[in-house]
Amino acid sequence: MVVIDTDVLSVYHIFQRDPRFKMTSLFMEESRKVERGVGIFNLLELCGVMATAGQIERALRLFKEYHARNDVKVLYPPVVLISEGEFWAQLNAEVTNRIERGMRFGDAAILWTLEANECELLITWNTKHFAGKTAINVQTPEEWLAEHSKD
C-alpha cells in the first residue's frame, strides 16, 4: 500500500502555489491506480493546517470525505481497549519507541500507524524525516512517478 504523508496532502489541498503542486497533483492522479492509504494522524495534521489557515469548515468536511472515499483508506493504529490506562500506556510505548529513533511526536505517531498496518511505501516531500528510521520505503512523489509513469 502506498501511504500519502501530510506534506503531500497539504500541497495538494492547500498550497496550490507551491512549486511542487504540479508534481503533487500528477502523483495524486496517477496513484489512484494503486492501493492508497492515509494515516489518521496525517489526516488530523492536515485538518490542523487547514484550521490554522482559517479553513475550519473545509477541514471538517475533508475529514469526513476521506473516510467516505473508495480510492484511499484511512489507516488507524491498533489500540488496546481494556482500560484508559492501558490505552495511554500503549500509545506512549509505541510513540516513544519511534521518538527514540530520532523523530518528532507527529512523525512518530504517523510511523506507528504505518508500521502497524504493514505499509510498504510512504510518499513524502520530507524523506529525511523517515529515511533510515523504518523499514518502510520512503519516496518523493517525483521519485514514485519516475518509477510508475507511462513510457
Image (cartoon, helix red, strand yellow):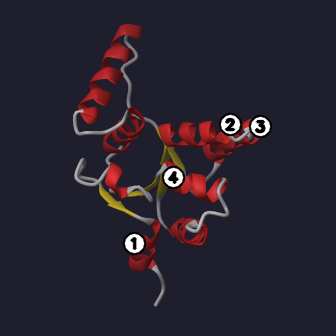
Callout 2–callout 3 Cβ contact below 8 Å: no
Give left or right: position of 69 versus 72: right
Residue 123 coordinates in the image, percent (x, y): 42, 59
Residue beneath disc 2: 51
Circle nearer the N terminus (1, 4): 4
Circle nearer the N terminus (2, 3): 2
State the SS at label 3. helix
Residue beneath disc 3: 57
- Amino acid type, mark 4: Asp
Circle nearer the N terminus (4, 2): 4
Q: Is residue 99 above or below residue 128?
A: above
Residue beneath disc 1: 143
Marks 3 and 4, how far apart in space?
A: 20 Å
| Nearer-the-camera pick, 70 or 41 | 41
Q: Dot 3: within a 10 Å radius of its alpha carbon, few (fewer than 14), some, or many (20 or more) residues? A: few
Residue 53 coordinates in the image, percent (x, y): 70, 41
- Amino acid type, mark 2: Ala
Callout 2–callout 1 Cβ contact below 8 Å: no
Q: Dot 1: within a 10 Å radius of its alpha carbon, few (fewer than 14), some, or many (20 or more) residues? A: few
Residue beneath disc 4: 7
Marks 4 and 2, how far apart in space?
A: 15 Å
Residue 106 coordinates in the image, percent (x, y): 42, 36
The total number of labels drawn is: 4
> Which residue is rendered at x = 61% and y = 36% of the image?
48
Callout 3–callout 4 Cβ contact below 8 Å: no
- Amino acid type, mark 3: Glu
Circle nearer the N terminus (3, 4): 4
Marks 3 and 1, how far apart in space?
A: 33 Å
Residue sitting at the far bottom: 151
**Quarter of the rendering containing residue 28:** bottom right
Q: Is residue 24 above or below residue 86?
A: below
Residue 141 coordinates in the image, percent (x, y): 46, 67
